[in-house]
């Protein structure tokens, strides 16, 4: 199963200058809970935005650089197709960014796990539009802002809509 996972604002913004534009500890906790012990596929810039490889996950990094040096345990590939081919078929695999990788994978994904951050921000990277004719919302959980979270946010899970109905 191929799952896209992201935190996006109301205008589908993902980030600016290769950085997230908010700090939401509960979103980080959910990301960690869902992706731990799984393969995570990402573009090189997304990988380089991490301080170090995320623990207990296998990183599959997509880059056009033929001599890209990644830390031990990371898999380096040159395309989304190659990234998927190098990931287990029998378990959930997560696409974690960035914007271009999300665009390439949204039509072949099985599931989308979003954190919708209820704000509009200036950004240079955006998540593709979720087409309601192709995706069905199956889970939604609202979280109001508090002392640790500057914005309201909602966890949402979408699965591919049944095309036979």
Image (cartoon, rainbow, N blue to C red):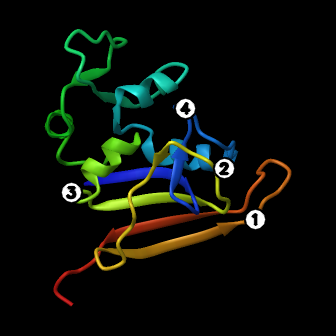
Q: Which residue is mark 2?
A: 26
Which residue sits at x=21%, y=90%?
165
Q: Residue reaching furthest right?
A: 147
Residue 108, which numbered label? 3
Q: Residue reaching furthest bottom?
A: 165
Which residue sits at x=37%, y=52%?
4
Q: Nearer the viewer, residue 55 or 135?
A: 135
Q: Are marks 1 and 2 in contact (CB under 8 Å)?
A: no
Q: Which residue is mark 1?
A: 144
Which residue sits at x=48%, y=27%?
54
Q: Secondary structure at mark 3?
A: loop
Camera-nearest label, 1 or 2: 1
Camera-nearest label, 1 or 4: 4
Which residue sits at x=51%, y=57%?
12
Tell me, yes or no, if residue 94 can be seen here: no
Q: CA distance from mark 4 to mark 2?
A: 23 Å
Q: Nearer the viewer, residue 118 or 123?
A: 123
Q: Position of residue 121 (x, y in %)?
A: 64, 51
Q: Position of residue 88 (x, y in %)?
A: 20, 40
């Amino acid at each position: 199963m191929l799952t896209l996972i992201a935190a996006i604002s109301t205008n589908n913004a993902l980030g600016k200058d290769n950085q997230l534009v908010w700090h939401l500890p509960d979103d980080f906790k959910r990301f960690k809970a869902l992706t731990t012990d799984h393969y995570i596929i990402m573009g090189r810039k997304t990988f380089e935005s991490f301080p170090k490889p995320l623990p207990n996950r296998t990183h599959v990094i997509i880059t056009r650089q033929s001599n890209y040096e990644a830390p031990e345990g990371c898999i380096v590939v040159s395309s989304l197709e190659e990234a998927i081919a190098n990931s287990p078929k029998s378990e959930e695999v997560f696409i974690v960014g960035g914007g271009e990788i999300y665009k390439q994978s949204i039509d072949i994904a099985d599931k989308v796990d979003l954190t919708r951050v209820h704000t509009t921000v200036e950004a240079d990277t955006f998540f593709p539009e979720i087409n309601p004719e192709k995706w069905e919302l199956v889970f939604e959980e609202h979280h109001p802002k508090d002392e640790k979270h500057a914005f309201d946010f909602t966890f949402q899970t979408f699965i591919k809509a049944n095309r036979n109905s």
